[in-house]
Amino acid sequence: MANTIKLLLAEDEAALGQILKESLETRDFEVILCENGDKAFENYKSEAPEILVLDVMMPKKDGFTLAKEIRAIDDTIPIIFLTAKSQTADVVEGFSIGGNDYLKKPFSIEELIVRVHNLVDRTKTQKTTKIITIGEFAFDLAKQQLKFKDEESIQLTHRESHLLFHLINNKNQVLDRSLILNKLWGTDDFFTARSMDVFISKLRKQLSKDENIQIINVRGFGYKLTD
């Protein structure tokens, strides 16, 4: 079908993997099911999926290691982590290495599908976005690159790019913390709030070459970008 989404699912729990595969296939998905990280990496290279759904705990190669290897060669494909972990450090690590979203087990197939569609649609939208100017920087959302004057471009992660895009779109206005957490992460719980703080700090560092650009923390409300 024309609207079919090609999805690579890496899940070592055979029963769960098969259930997810069959459920997704009844909803117009083409699913490539892999039982370990090594197989997932090979299928990623040969099958050209549109999105990756990776279990964090897998044999041979865990989801985080797999995501790092893929991000080294592909900055655009969306990645969702499936995890039984709820430790803040694990969630932050997942986002920091280039993950776009995560789902804690157990989860509903409907929730997974909504998140997949949101990420795939967002990725398609990025490809048509023009270069945005902010202070002395040029921001290319499609390539996820930030360039200061005539210097070499800085490669941003998915999350950094999306967060910067929304900050720029709301320049000189307070970007509501809960709103952006729900929009980009799908939830505004403690773990994602901590993750966003990490990404805000990274963006401040990336933009620090232009002293006029600031990302201000408006306590109790959110963040405001000024230039």
Image (spheres, rainbow, N blue to C red):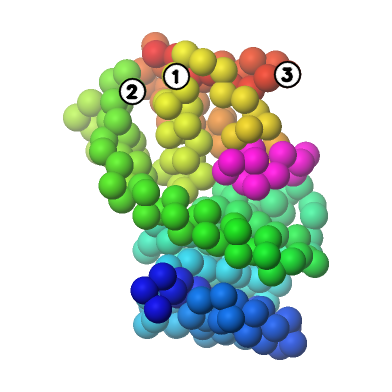
- The region drawn magenta spans 181-191
Q: Which image quadrant is residue 86 in?
A: bottom right
Q: Secondary structure at mark 1?
A: loop
Question: Label 1 vs label 2: CA separation?
Answer: 9 Å
Identify the residue position indicated by label 3 in the image.
220
The answer to whether marks 1 and 2 mark residues whose Cβ atoms lie closer than 8 Å is yes
Identify the residue position indicated by label 2 in the image.
134
Residue 204 badge: none
Front residue of this view, candidates 129 and 68: 129
Question: Label 2 vs label 3: CA separation?
Answer: 26 Å
Identify the residue position indicated by label 1 in the image.
171
Q: Give the class, few, some or many, for how many residues have Cα within 10 Å of label 3's Cα (few <14, many ≥20).
A: few
Task: Answer yes or no: is residue 105 visible.
Answer: yes
Q: Residue at x 29, y 26 (%)?
A: 133
Q: Earlier in the sequence, mark 2 or mark 3?
A: 2
Of the residues shown, which amino acid type is indicated by label 2?
Ile
x, y percent for residue 138: 28, 30
Front residue of this view, candidates 192 and 89: 192
Q: Earlier in the sequence, mark 1 or mark 2?
A: 2
Q: In the displayed structure, would residue 133 be above or below residue 99?
A: above
Q: In the displayed structure, would residue 67 be above or below residue 47?
A: above
